Image (cartoon, helix red, strand yellow):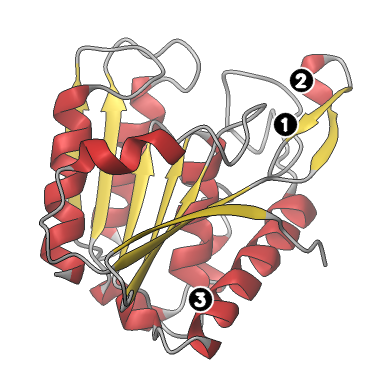
Amino acid sequence: MVDLTFETTELGSQPNATVIWLHGLGADGFDFLPIVPQLGLPDNANIRFIFPHAPTMPVTANGGYIMPAWYDLYSLGTRDPETDPQDEAGIKQSAAAILELITQENARGISNERIILIGFSQGAAMSLYTGLTIAKPLAGIAALSGYLPLHTTIDKDINPASKNTPIFMAHGIQDPVVMYEYGKDSAEFLKNLGYQVEWHEYPMEHSVCPDEIHSIGQWISSRLI
């Protein structure tokens, strides 16, 4: 299993909750670190934010170029396993590494009911897969500009207890990297499985915007404060 390195920032002097935020393909843990002050969290927030660095690996869709990635991508723009097989082993390996970070937080006195998993793009795929299959459900899962991976087989890995976990999903309607339809279809797929999905969409491409950041902050507050 890969041991993840990470960046950390804390609100308050005695954190009693944790947000683990996963970056996208080719980025690193510093990518979303500056977003914490923009979330507008209340002064009484006592939250530890952890921003892991994905391992580096050759990415097939980018000509084998070595970059930070949570799993390999064989092509861009599709997630149909019949035409574009997914890196199941890589996804599960990264999920195991993320679970180890959660276990470390448990050892510091933070239960899963006080932990939120957030991800952007490929990190969003990991937040969904990890949060739906974890043995002890989390306080919430947020997937930004991403999709549900392994959607044709994930039903055998899902922990039924995770269906009580609130899910925040957001996507840009002009996203040319992870198509809007993929995010929307994933949200509908999860709703049909019985999940509580809060859906947001914004007039943007593959990014985040101030209105979205504000909504994420409100959602985190509703879950942890």
At label 2, the amino acid type is Ala
Residue 61 marker: 2
Mark 2 or mark 3, earlier in chain: 2
| Residue positioned 58% across, 41% down in the render | 29
Residue 52: image location, x then y, percent? 60, 51
Q: Is residue 35 above or below residue 102?
A: above
Q: Which residue is mark 1?
A: 73
Q: Quadrant of residue 200?
A: top left
Which image quarter holds the C terminus? Answer: bottom left
- Label pair 3/1, CB-CB below 8 angstroms: no
Q: Which residue is painted at 31% across and 81% down in the image?
A: 113
Does dot 2 land on a helix, a strand or a loop? helix
Secondary structure beneath disc 1?
loop
* Label of residue 134 in the image: 3
Is residue 147 visible in this depiction of the protein?
no
Q: Position of residue 130 (x, y in %)?
A: 53, 63
